[in-house]
Image (cartoon, grey):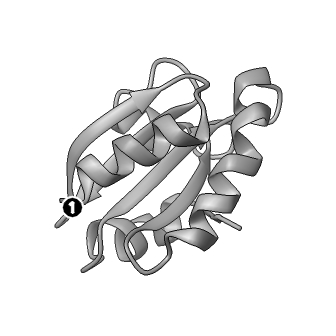
């Protein structure tokens, strides 16, 4: 299961991570976010050796969403060495998300 981050632990878990990180910006009321939740949780477990996967609620941490220019949800940001290297958005199949993750962690 993907752990939820807040502004308090974002720097440590994402920006200072030695491992690539995917952050899922979501909201509890968002239909496509709810659809993606089980996929994101599965991938957090299946790919934990390759990439760390976290969630950020835009309702609880709107400053983080604003800081990274998140305009729609779900938005998936991919970080490497503390920098955003890729992003994707919207509902998609597990296979498509895996393709994007694999491209981001090369």
Q: Tell whether 80 sits left or right of 60.
A: left
Residue found 68% across the figure and 45% down from its top: 60
Q: Residue at x 33, y 35 (%)?
A: 87
Q: Which residue is mark 1?
A: 80
Q: Secondary structure at mark 1?
A: strand
Query: Where 12 sits versus 96, above or below?
Result: below
| Position in image of residue 14 (x %, y %) | 36, 66
Whether residue 49 appears in this view of the structure is yes
Q: Residues within 10 Å of mark 1 (few under 14, many from 20)?
A: many
Q: Residue at x 45, y 44 (%)?
A: 64
Residue most extreme to the top: 71
- Residue 59 lies in quadrant: top right
Q: Is residue 7 left or right of residue 3?
A: left
Front residue (pair 5, 1): 1
Q: Is residue 20 left or right of residue 38?
A: left
Q: Position of residue 69 (x, y in %)?
A: 35, 27
Q: Quadrant of residue 73?
A: top right
Depth order, front residue of 1/28:
1
Q: Give the x, y percent position of residue 16.
A: 27, 75
Tell me if I can see residue 63 in this picture: no
Q: Is residue 100 above or below residue 89?
A: below
Q: Relative to the observer, which residue lies in front, 50 or 95?
A: 95
- Residue at the spot 58% in from the left edge and 66% down from the top edge: 44
Q: Quadrant of the C terminus?
A: bottom left
**Quadrant of residue 62 within the rendered picture:** top right
User: How many numbered marks appear?
Assistant: 1
- Give the answer, above or below, for where 103 lies relative to 51: above
Q: Position of residue 41 (x, y in %)?
A: 69, 59
Lateral position of residue 46 relative to residue 15, left or right: right
Quarter containing the N terminus: bottom right
């Amino acid at each position: 299961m993907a752990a939820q981050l807040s502004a308090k632990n974002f720097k440590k878990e994402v920006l200072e991570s030695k491992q690539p990180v995917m952050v899922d910006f979501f909201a509890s009321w968002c239909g496509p976010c709810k659809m993606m939740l089980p996929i994101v949780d599965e991938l957090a477990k299946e790919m934990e050796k390759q990439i760390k996967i976290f969630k950020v609620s835009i309702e609880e941490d709107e400053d983080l969403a604003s800081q990274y220019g998140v305009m729609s949800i779900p938005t998936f940001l991919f970080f490497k060495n503390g920098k955003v290297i890729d992003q994707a958005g919207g509902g998609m199949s597990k296979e498509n998300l895996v393709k994007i993750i694999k491209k981001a962690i090369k």
